[in-house]
Amino acid sequence: DTAVSQTPKYLVTQMGNDKSIKCEQNLGHDTMYWYKQDSKKFLKIMFSYNNKELIINETVPNRFSPKSPDKAHLNLHINSLELGDSAVYFCASSQDRGSGAPNTQYFGPGTRLTVL
Amino acid sequence: QQQVKQSPQSLIVQKGGISIINCAYENTAFDYFPWYQQFPGKGPALLIAIRPDVSEKKEGRFTISFNKSAKQFSLHIMDSQPGDSATYFCAASYNTNAGKSTFGDGTTLTVKP
């Protein structure tokens, strides 16, 4: 009964390749996020979707394209991978603030991306 | 512009000691201040959270102290245990449907036996 799941857990690929990471949440949340955690453990938001609509797009190269087929899924596609893309990518979800619920983020287990 | 500043970057405490991690924020519109705990190879998970209408919240050995006028909040871990060794993130968010959270840079806590 995993709350937020991501696949794959590890991803090793060559520079220039295109790869995707998938995320699913079964918490019934309306909002989903992608975060990037670098080697210094800094946690930076990349994107946020609310009910399948993009609402936050931080300064992220347009090689990164999120897609939300429904509110339980948020996938991340990365084109033309670069060495600097190596990091751990976390998916997260939260309940819609409009419901009055606190904005607690529920994180997935992460996908460690290594670009060679 | 970093809206939530966290210190120290790393902390080493002896077993049984008190661990204190501090955060300062800038945006007075923030209305929710959670702390997340992250173990190696895992995602961050909510540890404890506070709203600005209270000055302190305690859950077991973990306490958040909140100073609204100073725009600061801190996490205190009493009787620190080796199992508390992890990275701790403070965060802040405000009441919009976007629900964006701003995270501190993290503190790596090591509790020595």
Image: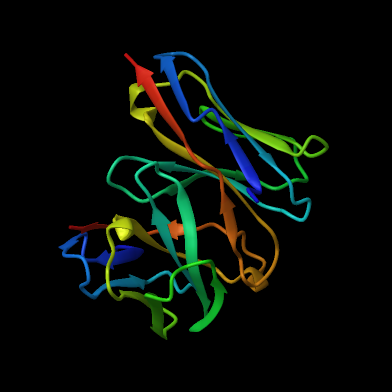
Does residue A30 appear anywhere in the picture? Answer: no
> Left of A50 or right of it: where is A89?
left
Q: Which sits in the foreground, A84 or B47?
A: A84
> Left of A1 or right of it: where is B108?
right
User: Residue A50's x, y, as percent?
Assistant: 54, 78
Quadrant of the rendering where the C terminus of chain A is positioned: bottom left
Q: Is residue B86 above or below residue B80?
A: below
Q: How many marks?
A: 0
Quadrant of the rendering where the N terminus of chain A is positioned: bottom left
Residue plotted at (78% across, 51% down): B28
Q: Residue furthest right?
A: B69
Does residue A43 appear anywhere in the picture? Answer: yes
Q: Is residue A24 above or below residue B74?
A: below
Residue A15: name its quadrant.
bottom left
User: Residue A33's x, y, as percent?
Assistant: 46, 67
Q: Residue furthest bottom?
A: A69
> Left of A58 or right of it: where is B108?
left
> Left of B58 or right of it: where is A46?
left
User: Residue A81's x, y, as percent?
Assistant: 27, 68
Residue plotted at (59% across, 53% down): B102
Q: Which sits in the foreground, B40 or B54?
A: B40
Residue A56: name its quadrant.
bottom right
Residue plotted at (67% across, 66% down): A100
Q: Which sits in the foreground, B107 or A71?
A: B107
Colouring of the image? rainbow
Q: Which sits in the foreground, A34 or B112?
A: A34
User: Residue A30's x, y, as percent?
Assistant: 51, 76
